[in-house]
Image (tube, helix red, strand yellow):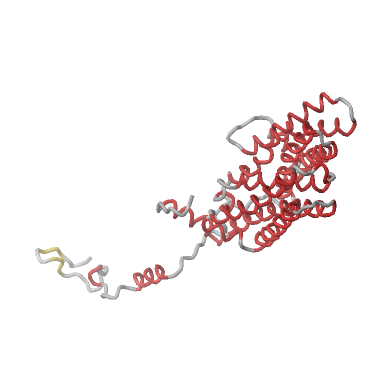
Amino acid sequence: MSDARITRDGLEGGRPGREATTGADVPPGGGPRRRGRKHRRDKEPEFRSYYDLPVINKPVWESPDIPGYLFLGGLAGAGALVGAAAHVTGRPALTRAAKVAAASAGQLSVAALVHDLGRPGRFLNMLRVFKVTSPMSVGSWLLAGFVPAASAAALADLTGRLRPVGTLATAGSAVLGGPVAAYTAALISDTAVPAWHQGHRWMPFVFVSSGLSAAAGLGLVAAPPAETAPLVPLAVGGGLAEVALTKVMEQRAGVAKEAYETGPAKKFLRTAEILTVGGALLAAVRPRSRARSVAAGAALLAGSALTRFGVFHAGLISAEDPKYTVVPQRARLDGADGVR
């Protein structure tokens, strides 16, 4: 038993070393722990997670299924709009090419989605309910209405039968074409993946302009120059808008901008930029020739596809590094103006 006792002058009889060292006993230079903390504050912060795992789960979507699905959806929706406009203005070759492209791209996009899901039943399960707050649910219903309408419009044009039904199907696919071209942007932006979520305000504009440039490019490839004059402003405007808006989206992505400038994402996006600008310039050159139109259209199609692949891979890169998740969260908590 200890002989220590409490008196007016404090503790008496206590054994030396019994009491813990107080803050007053710490040397002026600070103890080892304080020096360590100061040293850590001076260093560049390291963004680590338990067992060095990502903060968020990496998307289970795979390439080329999902980036192909993103591209084909844009081409299908914009192709339906071009086909309806060509139908109204009496351009038979362009009408047929655009309608067939819209139907084929729509069917292939569903096939790519089902292949990524693993079983057709999983796609059908998404049609059991309609949830307006779920981009996947809305998109599934859009495809369920768009693909049959676009297919009926193309079939009526190819066979020359049931033209009234084909006209109604053309109108229906055109009405759904815009949402089909845009909803995939909402689909990937409505996730925790930093490179996608940080670009949610610009992604729909990027995807729609990319889809329009792709549809215009396909028309330039498949239809004679005599019918494609109205596609030239669409090809030039859509292509240049796609490049410019992609740049804006990258700049507004905050620290996640680095994901667009790294690895395969950088290669895809820079190649897409060269092809799209080159295709737009070729399309604008007069007088137009068949060979030049085909080259311009092929470049626009390839550029649009590579844009989707670049955006997709930027998302995968940003999901793997905790920095892209942690920095925007801290900035939002601190009320930083640089993160939107």
> Residue 297: percent from the left, percent from the top?
78, 51
> Residue 86: percent from the left, percent from the top?
78, 36
Question: In which image quadrant can residue 120 be found?
Answer: top right
Query: Is residue 238 toward the left or the right of residue 39 in the image?
Result: right
> Residue 168: percent from the left, percent from the top?
77, 26
> Residue 312: percent from the left, percent from the top?
66, 53
The image quadrant where one finds the N terminus is: bottom left
Question: In which image quadrant can residue 251 be found?
Answer: bottom right
Outermost residue, left side: 8
Question: In which image quadrant can residue 247 be found?
Answer: bottom right
Q: Residue at x 72, y 39 (%)?
A: 77
The front one of 73 and 222 is 222
Query: Is residue 309 toward the left or the right of residue 10 in the image?
Result: right
The front one of 329 and 291 is 291
Outermost residue, front side: 287
Q: Is residue 169 above or below residue 187?
A: above
The front one of 233 and 316 is 233
Q: Residue at x 83, y 40 (%)?
A: 97
Query: Is residue 6 toward the left or the right of residue 31 in the image?
Result: left
Q: Is residue 201 above or below residue 158?
A: below
Q: Residue at x 76, y 45 (%)?
A: 112
